[in-house]
Image: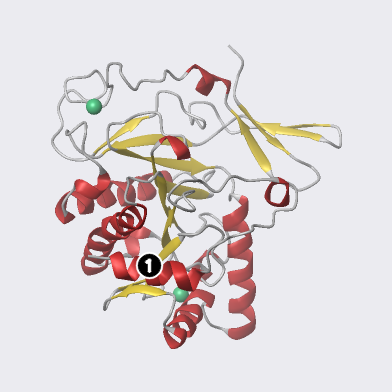
Amino acid sequence: MVESEIRRNPFTNELIIYSPARQKRPNRKEEYCPLCSGSKEVPEFKKPLRITNKYPSLDNRKDFKKVKTGTFFEKSNPYGFCELVVYTKKHDAMFIDLNEEEILAIFIEWRDATMDFAKDSNIKYILPFENYGEDVGATLIHPHGQIYGFPFIPPIIEKEFNTAVQYKNERKQCMVCDYIIAEKEEKERIIYEDDHIISIVPYFAKYAYDVYVYPKRHYGLLHHSTQREMESFSTLLPKVIQSVNSIFNKKVSYSLSLNQSPLNTPGSAAFHMYFKIHTPQRNKESLKLLGAVETSGGTFINGTLPEQAAKSLRNNLE
Ligand SMILES: [Zn+2]
Ligand SMILES: [Zn+2]
Protein backbone atom coordinates (compact mmCIF):
# COMPACT_ATOMS: atom_id res chain seq x y z
CA MET A 1 0.00 0.00 0.00
CA VAL A 2 1.20 3.54 -0.75
CA GLU A 3 2.26 5.19 2.52
CA SER A 4 0.78 8.46 3.70
CA GLU A 5 3.08 11.45 3.97
CA ILE A 6 3.21 15.17 4.66
CA ARG A 7 4.94 17.29 2.00
CA ARG A 8 5.98 20.93 2.14
CA ASN A 9 5.22 23.44 -0.60
CA PRO A 10 8.54 25.34 -0.67
CA PHE A 11 6.91 28.37 -2.32
CA THR A 12 4.28 29.01 0.37
CA ASN A 13 5.66 26.89 3.22
CA GLU A 14 2.27 25.12 3.46
CA LEU A 15 2.10 21.45 4.36
CA ILE A 16 -0.13 19.03 2.49
CA ILE A 17 -1.20 15.67 3.94
CA TYR A 18 -1.32 12.85 1.37
CA SER A 19 -3.48 10.02 2.62
CA PRO A 20 -4.07 7.35 -0.07
CA ALA A 21 -5.80 5.05 2.45
CA ARG A 22 -8.66 7.54 2.77
CA GLN A 23 -9.62 6.89 -0.87
CA LYS A 24 -10.61 3.41 0.25
CA ARG A 25 -13.13 4.70 2.80
CA PRO A 26 -16.45 3.07 2.02
CA ASN A 27 -19.46 5.25 1.32
CA ARG A 28 -21.51 3.84 4.14
CA LYS A 29 -24.82 5.59 3.75
CA GLU A 30 -26.94 2.46 3.48
CA GLU A 31 -24.48 -0.03 4.89
CA TYR A 32 -23.55 -1.37 8.29
CA CYS A 33 -22.86 1.44 10.78
CA PRO A 34 -19.55 1.00 12.63
CA LEU A 35 -20.59 3.55 15.28
CA CYS A 36 -23.84 1.89 16.37
CA SER A 37 -23.80 0.01 19.68
CA GLY A 38 -22.93 -3.64 19.21
CA SER A 39 -20.37 -2.94 16.49
CA LYS A 40 -16.73 -3.97 16.84
CA GLU A 41 -15.70 -0.36 17.51
CA VAL A 42 -18.58 0.43 19.91
CA PRO A 43 -19.55 -2.75 21.77
CA GLU A 44 -21.68 -0.78 24.22
CA PHE A 45 -22.45 2.93 24.39
CA LYS A 46 -22.57 4.47 27.89
CA LYS A 47 -21.27 7.98 27.25
CA PRO A 48 -19.51 9.83 24.40
CA LEU A 49 -16.70 7.58 23.38
CA ARG A 50 -13.31 8.22 21.78
CA ILE A 51 -12.15 5.65 19.24
CA THR A 52 -9.20 5.58 16.84
CA ASN A 53 -10.07 6.56 13.27
CA LYS A 54 -9.88 3.47 11.01
CA TYR A 55 -8.80 5.63 8.07
CA PRO A 56 -6.47 8.11 9.77
CA SER A 57 -4.77 10.98 7.94
CA LEU A 58 -2.31 11.18 10.84
CA ASP A 59 -0.91 8.31 12.84
CA ASN A 60 1.46 8.11 15.84
CA ARG A 61 2.56 4.48 15.43
CA LYS A 62 5.85 5.41 13.75
CA ASP A 63 8.37 7.93 15.08
CA PHE A 64 8.15 11.41 13.58
CA LYS A 65 10.84 11.75 10.91
CA LYS A 66 11.50 14.53 8.39
CA VAL A 67 13.42 13.91 5.16
CA LYS A 68 14.77 16.57 2.81
CA THR A 69 16.14 15.66 -0.61
CA GLY A 70 17.27 18.80 -2.44
CA THR A 71 15.94 22.34 -2.27
CA PHE A 72 12.35 21.58 -3.17
CA PHE A 73 11.48 18.19 -1.74
CA GLU A 74 10.79 17.94 1.98
CA LYS A 75 8.47 15.41 3.52
CA SER A 76 7.73 13.64 6.78
CA ASN A 77 5.69 10.65 7.80
CA PRO A 78 2.11 11.68 8.75
CA TYR A 79 2.78 11.72 12.48
CA GLY A 80 -0.13 12.70 14.70
CA PHE A 81 -3.46 11.61 16.11
CA CYS A 82 -6.88 11.04 14.55
CA GLU A 83 -9.74 10.00 16.78
CA LEU A 84 -13.50 9.87 16.43
CA VAL A 85 -15.88 10.79 19.23
CA VAL A 86 -19.17 8.89 19.06
CA TYR A 87 -21.78 11.31 20.45
CA THR A 88 -24.79 9.10 21.16
CA LYS A 89 -26.23 5.66 20.58
CA LYS A 90 -29.05 7.20 18.51
CA HIS A 91 -28.02 6.56 14.89
CA ASP A 92 -30.40 9.09 13.34
CA ALA A 93 -29.98 11.88 15.88
CA MET A 94 -27.99 15.04 15.23
CA PHE A 95 -25.74 17.15 17.43
CA ILE A 96 -28.54 19.74 17.60
CA ASP A 97 -31.01 17.11 18.88
CA LEU A 98 -28.88 16.35 21.94
CA ASN A 99 -29.57 18.01 25.27
CA GLU A 100 -27.14 20.30 27.10
CA GLU A 101 -25.92 17.49 29.33
CA GLU A 102 -25.16 15.21 26.36
CA ILE A 103 -23.31 18.01 24.57
CA LEU A 104 -21.33 18.85 27.68
CA ALA A 105 -20.25 15.19 27.83
CA ILE A 106 -18.98 15.49 24.21
CA PHE A 107 -16.98 18.62 25.00
CA ILE A 108 -15.50 16.84 28.02
CA GLU A 109 -14.14 14.19 25.59
CA TRP A 110 -12.76 16.96 23.32
CA ARG A 111 -11.14 18.51 26.38
CA ASP A 112 -9.64 15.23 27.64
CA ALA A 113 -8.29 14.34 24.19
CA THR A 114 -6.60 17.76 24.04
CA MET A 115 -4.93 17.06 27.39
CA ASP A 116 -3.86 13.56 26.28
CA PHE A 117 -2.45 14.55 22.86
CA ALA A 118 -0.68 17.57 24.39
CA LYS A 119 1.58 15.21 26.36
CA ASP A 120 3.35 14.32 23.09
CA SER A 121 6.01 16.97 22.47
CA ASN A 122 5.81 16.43 18.67
CA ILE A 123 2.22 17.70 18.66
CA LYS A 124 1.89 21.39 17.84
CA TYR A 125 -1.85 21.75 17.36
CA ILE A 126 -5.03 19.94 18.36
CA LEU A 127 -8.23 20.46 16.42
CA PRO A 128 -11.50 18.96 17.67
CA PHE A 129 -14.30 19.32 15.12
CA GLU A 130 -17.50 17.97 13.67
CA ASN A 131 -18.29 17.83 9.96
CA TYR A 132 -22.01 17.34 9.42
CA GLY A 133 -23.46 16.64 5.98
CA GLU A 134 -22.30 15.79 2.48
CA ASP A 135 -21.39 19.35 1.55
CA VAL A 136 -18.53 19.33 4.05
CA GLY A 137 -17.46 15.77 3.20
CA ALA A 138 -19.00 13.75 6.06
CA THR A 139 -19.24 10.06 5.12
CA LEU A 140 -20.78 8.60 8.29
CA ILE A 141 -24.33 9.47 9.32
CA HIS A 142 -24.05 8.38 12.96
CA PRO A 143 -23.48 11.53 15.09
CA HIS A 144 -19.78 11.92 15.77
CA GLY A 145 -16.95 14.40 15.94
CA GLN A 146 -13.23 14.07 15.29
CA ILE A 147 -10.02 15.19 16.93
CA TYR A 148 -6.80 15.72 15.00
CA GLY A 149 -3.42 16.21 16.66
CA PHE A 150 -1.04 17.82 14.13
CA PRO A 151 2.78 17.84 14.21
CA PHE A 152 2.59 21.40 12.83
CA ILE A 153 0.43 24.50 13.27
CA PRO A 154 -2.09 24.67 10.39
CA PRO A 155 -1.64 27.86 8.31
CA ILE A 156 -4.80 29.78 9.24
CA ILE A 157 -4.12 29.25 12.93
CA GLU A 158 -0.45 30.05 12.45
CA LYS A 159 -1.30 33.39 10.85
CA GLU A 160 -3.75 34.24 13.64
CA PHE A 161 -1.25 33.12 16.25
CA ASN A 162 1.63 35.18 14.84
CA THR A 163 -0.61 38.25 14.68
CA ALA A 164 -1.77 37.69 18.26
CA VAL A 165 1.83 37.34 19.50
CA GLN A 166 2.87 40.53 17.70
CA TYR A 167 -0.15 42.44 19.07
CA LYS A 168 0.59 41.25 22.59
CA ASN A 169 4.26 42.23 22.32
CA GLU A 170 3.33 45.71 21.11
CA ARG A 171 0.29 46.50 23.29
CA LYS A 172 0.62 44.08 26.24
CA GLN A 173 -2.99 43.01 25.62
CA CYS A 174 -4.75 40.07 24.03
CA MET A 175 -5.98 40.98 20.57
CA VAL A 176 -9.18 38.94 20.91
CA CYS A 177 -10.00 40.42 24.35
CA ASP A 178 -9.66 43.87 22.73
CA TYR A 179 -11.67 42.76 19.68
CA ILE A 180 -14.54 41.60 21.92
CA ILE A 181 -14.65 45.06 23.55
CA ALA A 182 -14.71 46.71 20.09
CA GLU A 183 -17.51 44.41 18.85
CA LYS A 184 -19.54 45.13 22.00
CA GLU A 185 -19.30 48.85 21.22
CA GLU A 186 -20.57 48.27 17.67
CA LYS A 187 -23.22 45.71 18.82
CA GLU A 188 -24.66 44.87 15.39
CA ARG A 189 -22.60 41.74 14.72
CA ILE A 190 -23.31 40.16 18.12
CA ILE A 191 -25.70 37.20 18.05
CA TYR A 192 -25.68 36.29 21.72
CA GLU A 193 -23.92 37.15 24.94
CA ASP A 194 -24.10 35.94 28.54
CA ASP A 195 -21.76 36.32 31.53
CA HIS A 196 -19.29 33.78 30.13
CA ILE A 197 -19.34 33.72 26.32
CA ILE A 198 -20.04 35.92 23.33
CA SER A 199 -21.08 34.92 19.82
CA ILE A 200 -20.32 37.08 16.80
CA VAL A 201 -20.44 37.03 13.01
CA PRO A 202 -17.02 38.64 12.72
CA TYR A 203 -16.46 41.87 10.80
CA PHE A 204 -14.27 39.84 8.41
CA ALA A 205 -16.45 36.70 7.87
CA LYS A 206 -15.38 34.82 4.73
CA TYR A 207 -18.61 32.89 4.27
CA ALA A 208 -22.19 34.14 4.64
CA TYR A 209 -22.90 32.58 8.04
CA ASP A 210 -19.53 32.11 9.75
CA VAL A 211 -20.03 32.33 13.51
CA TYR A 212 -17.33 32.65 16.18
CA VAL A 213 -18.04 31.92 19.85
CA TYR A 214 -15.45 33.22 22.30
CA PRO A 215 -15.11 32.80 26.05
CA LYS A 216 -15.07 36.31 27.54
CA ARG A 217 -12.20 35.33 29.82
CA HIS A 218 -8.77 34.99 28.27
CA TYR A 219 -7.51 31.42 27.83
CA GLY A 220 -6.26 29.25 24.99
CA LEU A 221 -7.32 25.66 25.67
CA LEU A 222 -10.65 24.01 26.43
CA HIS A 223 -9.37 22.49 29.68
CA HIS A 224 -8.94 26.01 31.05
CA SER A 225 -12.72 26.54 30.83
CA THR A 226 -14.79 26.63 34.00
CA GLN A 227 -17.87 24.45 34.38
CA ARG A 228 -20.06 27.52 33.74
CA GLU A 229 -18.20 28.36 30.53
CA MET A 230 -18.51 24.74 29.33
CA GLU A 231 -22.25 24.86 30.09
CA SER A 232 -22.67 28.11 28.16
CA PHE A 233 -20.92 26.65 25.09
CA SER A 234 -23.04 23.49 25.35
CA THR A 235 -26.26 25.48 25.45
CA LEU A 236 -25.46 27.99 22.74
CA LEU A 237 -23.66 26.05 19.99
CA PRO A 238 -26.58 23.80 18.96
CA LYS A 239 -28.88 26.85 19.06
CA VAL A 240 -26.66 28.72 16.59
CA ILE A 241 -26.67 25.74 14.20
CA GLN A 242 -30.45 25.49 14.63
CA SER A 243 -30.71 29.19 13.83
CA VAL A 244 -28.81 28.70 10.54
CA ASN A 245 -31.15 25.80 9.74
CA SER A 246 -34.19 28.01 10.44
CA ILE A 247 -32.90 30.69 8.06
CA PHE A 248 -32.57 28.16 5.22
CA ASN A 249 -35.49 25.99 6.32
CA LYS A 250 -33.38 22.83 6.06
CA LYS A 251 -30.59 20.94 7.81
CA VAL A 252 -27.50 22.60 6.35
CA SER A 253 -24.08 20.98 6.16
CA TYR A 254 -21.74 22.59 8.64
CA SER A 255 -18.37 22.33 10.36
CA LEU A 256 -18.07 23.06 14.05
CA SER A 257 -14.48 23.43 15.21
CA LEU A 258 -12.66 24.35 18.37
CA ASN A 259 -9.72 26.60 17.57
CA GLN A 260 -7.26 26.37 20.42
CA SER A 261 -3.80 27.64 21.24
CA PRO A 262 -0.77 26.00 19.60
CA LEU A 263 1.17 23.64 21.86
CA ASN A 264 4.86 23.23 22.54
CA THR A 265 5.31 26.65 20.91
CA PRO A 266 6.73 29.80 22.55
CA GLY A 267 4.20 32.62 23.05
CA SER A 268 1.17 30.31 23.00
CA ALA A 269 -0.40 32.12 25.99
CA ALA A 270 -1.24 34.98 23.57
CA PHE A 271 -3.90 32.84 21.84
CA HIS A 272 -7.57 33.22 22.84
CA MET A 273 -9.55 30.08 21.97
CA TYR A 274 -12.88 30.09 20.16
CA PHE A 275 -15.44 27.81 18.59
CA LYS A 276 -16.21 28.38 14.94
CA ILE A 277 -19.32 27.37 13.04
CA HIS A 278 -19.04 27.36 9.28
CA THR A 279 -21.51 26.42 6.56
CA PRO A 280 -20.87 26.59 2.81
CA GLN A 281 -24.61 27.34 2.36
CA ARG A 282 -24.87 30.88 0.96
CA ASN A 283 -28.57 31.04 0.19
CA LYS A 284 -31.56 28.64 0.15
CA GLU A 285 -30.61 27.17 -3.22
CA SER A 286 -26.85 27.17 -3.41
CA LEU A 287 -23.48 26.71 -1.78
CA LYS A 288 -20.48 29.00 -1.86
CA LEU A 289 -18.08 27.22 -4.20
CA LEU A 290 -14.51 28.39 -4.53
CA GLY A 291 -13.38 29.85 -7.87
CA ALA A 292 -10.12 31.35 -9.06
CA VAL A 293 -10.35 34.49 -6.94
CA GLU A 294 -10.44 32.30 -3.84
CA THR A 295 -8.27 29.33 -4.93
CA SER A 296 -5.55 31.26 -6.74
CA GLY A 297 -5.85 34.64 -5.07
CA GLY A 298 -6.85 33.49 -1.59
CA THR A 299 -9.35 36.37 -1.55
CA PHE A 300 -12.95 35.60 -0.67
CA ILE A 301 -15.98 37.25 -2.21
CA ASN A 302 -18.91 37.08 0.21
CA GLY A 303 -22.40 38.13 -0.93
CA THR A 304 -23.70 38.65 2.63
CA LEU A 305 -22.52 41.38 4.94
CA PRO A 306 -21.75 40.08 8.46
CA GLU A 307 -24.21 42.63 9.94
CA GLN A 308 -27.07 41.16 7.84
CA ALA A 309 -26.11 37.60 8.77
CA ALA A 310 -25.91 38.48 12.49
CA LYS A 311 -29.36 40.09 12.38
CA SER A 312 -30.92 36.99 10.75
CA LEU A 313 -29.19 34.66 13.19
CA ARG A 314 -30.30 36.77 16.19
CA ASN A 315 -33.89 36.77 14.93
CA ASN A 316 -33.89 32.99 14.53
CA LEU A 317 -32.12 32.15 17.79
CA GLU A 318 -34.53 30.38 20.13
ZN1 LIG B 1 -25.07 4.13 13.73
ZN1 LIG C 1 -7.90 37.15 25.24
Residue under circle 1?
312
Looking at the image, which is closer to me, 291 or 278?
291
Image coloring type:
secondary structure
Residue at 51% over, 32% down: 58
Q: Secondary structure at mark 1?
A: helix
Camera-nearest residue between 305 and 171: 305
Q: Quadrant of residue 138?
A: top left
Residue furthest to the top in view is 1
**Left or right: 21 with respect to 103?**
right
Q: Position of residue 110 (x, y in %)?
A: 33, 48
Amino acid marked by disc 1? Ser
Name the image quarter holding the N terminus.
Answer: top right
Q: Work out which residue is located at the far front of the displayed protein and give it.
A: 285
Measured as percent of width and height from the top left, residue 231 is found at 21, 63
193, above or below 72, in the image: below
The answer to whether any part of residue 178 appears in the image is yes
Tell me which residue sits at (45%, 41%) in the image.
Answer: 148
Q: Residue at x 34, y 22 (%)?
A: 29
Q: Position of residue 260 (x, y in %)?
A: 45, 58
Report whether 224 appears left or right of 120: left
Left or right? Give the position of 226 relative to 280. Answer: left
Q: Quadrant of the C terminus?
A: bottom left
Q: Which residue is more in the foreground, 318 or 63? A: 318
Determine if residue 219 is in view.
no
